[in-house]
Image: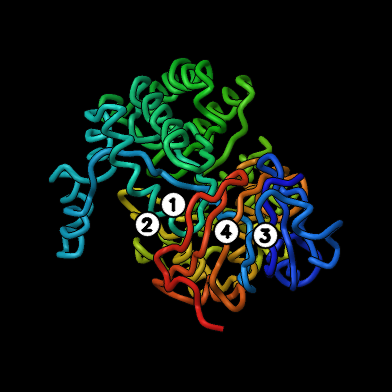
Amino acid sequence: MWDSLWTGARLATMVAGGAPYGAVENGALGVAQGRIAFCGPAAELPAGPGALARETHDLEGRWITPGLIDCHTHLVYGGDRAGEFEMRLEGASYEQLLEAGGGILSTVRATREASQDELVAASLPRLDAMLAEGVTTVEIKSGYGLDVATETEMLRAARRLGELRPVTVATTFLGAHALPPEFKGRADDYIDLVCDEALPAAASEELADAVDVFCERVAFDLGQTERVFRRARELGLPVKLHAEQLSDMGGAALAARYGALSCDHLEFLSEEGAQAMAEAGTVAVLLPGAFYFLRDTHVPPVELLRRLGVPIAVSTDCNPGSSPATSLLLMLSMAATFFRLTPEEALAGVTREAARALGMAAERGTLEAGKAADLAVWDIERPAELAYRIGFNPLYAAVQAGRVARVEGSGGGPSSR
């Protein structure tokens, strides 16, 4: 017997190749042992609802989507940079911000000074805001420690968040995020530390599910990036890349040669890089929050990605310096308005393609029998509302691994029909 059965539902399965959104009207979804046991038209249920499940939920026409997946975040960090934001709006230059102690190194200082308990406490409100919008899986990167001890402590804090809340946490080692002050002018020496000490330490404790690098003129070059990729491969870890955000460094093509799960940002992606990603099956993760916050004007080449068949994911890029965002629903709207994704592409970007970007496509991202029962139930009339509305949360219920994690979000509650 199933544990639960959800009837009276409209299903946005997000399975590609069929109806828009993979939609099923008059649908039903059964859950057993944390997994989807049935997903399809209610008329195809094998028996009456009472004989199938221990408990039945009538959704009265509400929509079920896969639980949302935020596949690129820097959720764990110390301090904040609101003061820096204010100074920048008052006309301060980047050099003036650095002189005042701002920039990424201010976050590094605050993160190094914080205990694991303090990092967890600071991160929980950010995580809770995501869960309130139907997020059931979140990726969390390190990258604000820039030393062995703090990088591993950030990853431990990320793992703890997954124990404290009903959410699946995927962790990513991002030791090569920026050059720490003690290595000024010695980037190759710092990459030695990353490859010889920090990354192996994270791998030995099984703290990292993937490895990322910031490949950019203000961070690390192609040669340094490849050194980290080679070490990750030796340790059996998949790679990702912050690529082509500020210039075309050729990072996407390099990452594709290493079978990268994703390349993220991509405002300056070339056709050569996009072709390499397409051939490797590497996902393009678009980050409209950073595009907005930095007042960028160079839009990622979405039409090129479409033409070449590169999967497109969307994420918050939650971080203190360039995207202090926790609303994945807002990112759907931004992805549609700034980048011209269709509402269906945007929703696929935080479900099916986001799962692919984390190497989780076999387990999550679509409503299919056998996959994890991570669900979001919405008080909406059509899935396009999730990208259409701004500042409105229509979440009715969230289900993580088959268990109801949240009922009636902060939106309007049940709407009249």
Q: Earlier in the sequence, mark 3 or mark 2?
A: 3
Residue 123 placement, left or right of 167? left
Q: Which residue is pictured at 25% across the width and 45% down the height?
A: 103
3D distance between C-alphas at marks 3 and 2: 32 Å
Q: Nearer the viewer, residue 316 or 245?
A: 316
Q: Is residue 160 above or below residue 140?
A: above
The reply to whether callout 1 and callout 2 are in contact (CB within 8 Å) is yes
Q: Secondary structure at mark 3?
A: strand
Question: What residue does disc 1 label?
Answer: 317
Q: Earlier in the sequence, mark 4 or mark 1?
A: 1
Q: Disc 4 marks which amino acid?
A: Ala
Binning the other alpha carbons within 10 Å of mark 3 as few (below 14), some (14 to 19) or many (20 upward) gives many
The reply to whether callout 4 and callout 2 are in contact (CB within 8 Å) is no
3D distance between C-alphas at marks 4 and 3: 12 Å
Q: Nearer the viewer, mark 3 or mark 2?
A: 3
Question: What residue does disc 2 label?
Answer: 325
Q: Earlier in the sequence, mark 4 or mark 2?
A: 2
Q: Disc 3 marks which amino acid?
A: Trp
Q: Earlier in the sequence, mark 1 or mark 3?
A: 3
Residue 80 placement, left or right of 287? left
